[in-house]
Amino acid sequence: MAQSRAGSLALVGGVLALDFANTAGGRDLPEPIEHLQAPRHLLDWSVHASVLPPELAGSLHATLAADPKAAQALLEAALGLREAIHRVGSAIAQRRTPAAPDLATLRQVSAAALAEAQLAPDESGRCSLRFAAAPATAAILGPIAWSALDLLRQGDLARLKQCPAADCGWLFLDTTRNGSRRWCDMATCGNRTKARRHRHSTA
Ligand SMILES: [Zn+2]
């Protein structure tokens, strides 16, 4: 399996939940691309995507290293949530109705994290959810699941799109004024596909 780039992946989804869904790609290929191959990759990505402060990730890393079973359970819970977000997002991008079990997963993970969270006033005068630093499922999966919930409840879902490159399939919110964004990233998938087309047309 290719090396994980969990700690440096492009964050082009527009919201946290979609960036998390984009830690894998090419799901229809015989060998999908997986960046969360081990629990530490989940921590690497969480710091990269500002879900966890580095100090908390460091202490979680030590906790999980001492308890491989808990670390594996965390990774499995994370992958379960991620694939639910991906399937829901992909369905919406294709103007299909998301599957009930996937929506139930989002609700269950959100509810579990909410039970451990605080609702507190922030600088803006609004209130925000502060997720507990432990357990790790609440600390990491809570913000991601709530990001998905916020997107589904209040996001501009007409702008939710899926990159058409076969080895990608990343999800993103198209925030261009005329809704013309086709690729997750023009610099990678867009150019790659253009180059391939060019090669074909000149062959
Ligand atoms: Zn792409």
Image (spheres, grey):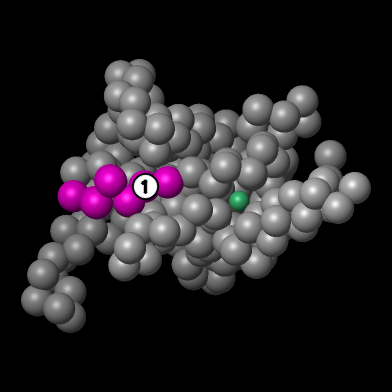
Residue type at mark 1 is Leu
- View extreme (left): residue: 125
**Residue 72 lies within the magenta run:** no
Residue 142 seen in the current view: no
Looking at this view, name the residue that lies furthest to the front.
202
Q: Residues within 10 Å of mark 1 (few under 14, many from 20)?
A: many
Q: Is residue 25 visible?
A: yes
Of residues 24 and 66, the one drawn nearer to the viewer in this rendering = 24
Residue 140 lies, in percent from the top left, at 45, 51
The boundaries of the magenta stretch are 154-161
The front one of 122 and 102 is 102
Instruction: Tell me residue 145's x, y (percent).
Output: 35, 44
For image coordinates 64% across by 44% down, the residue present is 165
Q: Is residue 112 above or below residue 63?
A: above
Whether residue 172 is situated above or below residue 126 in the rendered picture: above
Q: Is residue 157 magenta?
A: yes
Give the residue at x 53% y 62%.
11
Q: Which residue is mark 1?
A: 160
The quarter of the image holding the N terminus is: top right
Q: Is residue 28 left or right of residue 93?
A: right
Q: Secondary structure at mark 1?
A: strand
Q: Describe residue 51's horizontal placement relative to residue 119 as left or right.
A: right
| Residue in view at x 65 percent, y 28 percent | 28
Q: Residue furthest right?
A: 203
Q: Position of residue 33 (x, y in %)?
A: 72, 40
Residue drawn at 9 percent across, 76 percent down:
125
Total marks shown come to 1
